[in-house]
């Protein structure tokens, strides 16, 4: 129990991460590990739903990410699929994915400038796809930016 509390004091963890960390020691018994996890859950120190909501919120605040990328990051934390989907739904009702992609585009344009060549446009497209935004949304934004650059170039 003491080891579990120390691990949680260091950083929040999912149930699967906690189980993994507690089982690392050769003296760890499966039955004791499960009792510790159950007790930590009863005390409210270990809660996957709460962890997932917090993780999604903090990731989206720190950097604009699409639904696909955030889902993948949460799956790496070994969260149950239904918990991941609920957290994603909650996070993306609070934050508009359109607004997030606008933030990502603005940041990229600030750093690299507006794409003026086909190669630069492709790089922006790839960047947004790596951030986990949907193909349709990325395509729409890149086309919109290209049209803006075209009209600025013609005027």
Image (cartoon, rainbow, N blue to C red):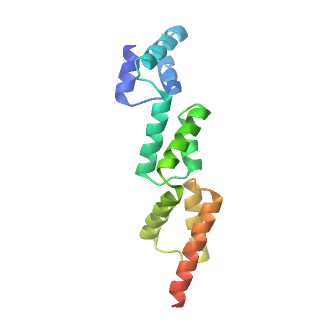
- Residue shown at 51%/52% (left/top)? 65
Seen as rendered, the residue at the extreme right is 136
43 to the left or right of 16: left
As displayed, is residue 124 above or below residue 52?
below
Where 84 falls versus 99 (above or below)?
Answer: above
Q: Residue at x 38, y 31 (%)?
A: 11
Q: Please name the residue shown 48% across and 15% down the image.
A: 38
Any part of residue 148 in sight: yes
- Asked if residue 137 lies left or right of residue 96, the reply is right
Is 98 drawn above or below residue 38 in the view shown?
Answer: below
- What residue occupies the far front of the structure in this picture? 93
Q: Is residue 129 left or right of residue 63?
A: right
Dividing the picture into quadrants, the one containing residue 130 is bottom right
The vertical placement of 122 against 30, above or below, is: below
- Residue 102 drawn at (x, y percent): 49, 63
What residue sits 52% from the left and 23% below the top?
Answer: 20
Where in the figure is residue 66, as x and y percent of width and height?
Answer: 55, 52
Q: How many marks?
A: 0
Q: Which part of the image, by quadrant, shows the N terminus?
A: top left
Q: Is residue 28 visible?
A: no
| Of residues 51 and 120, the one drawn nearer to the viewer in this rendering | 51
Q: Position of residue 124 (x, y in %)?
A: 55, 66
**Residue 121 position in % (x across, y down):** 58, 71
């Amino acid at each position: 129990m003491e080891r579990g509390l120390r691990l949680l004091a260091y950083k929040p963890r999912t149930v699967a991460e906690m189980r993994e960390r507690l089982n690392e020691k050769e003296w760890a018994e499966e039955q004791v590990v499960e009792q510790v996890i159950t007790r930590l859950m009863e005390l409210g120190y270990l809660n996957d739903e709460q962890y997932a909501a917090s993780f999604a919120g903090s990731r989206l605040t720190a950097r604009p990410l699409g639904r696909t990328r955030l889902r993948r990051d949460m799956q790496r934390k070994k969260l149950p699929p239904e918990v991941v989907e609920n957290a994603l739904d909650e996070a993306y009702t609070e934050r508009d994915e359109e607004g997030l992609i606008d933030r990502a585009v603005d940041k990229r344009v600030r750093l690299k400038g507006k794409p003026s060549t086909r190669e630069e446009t492709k790089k922006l497209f790839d960047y947004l796809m790596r951030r986990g935004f949907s193909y349709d949304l990325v395509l729409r934004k890149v086309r919109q930016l290209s049209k803006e650059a075209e009209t600025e170039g013609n005027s």
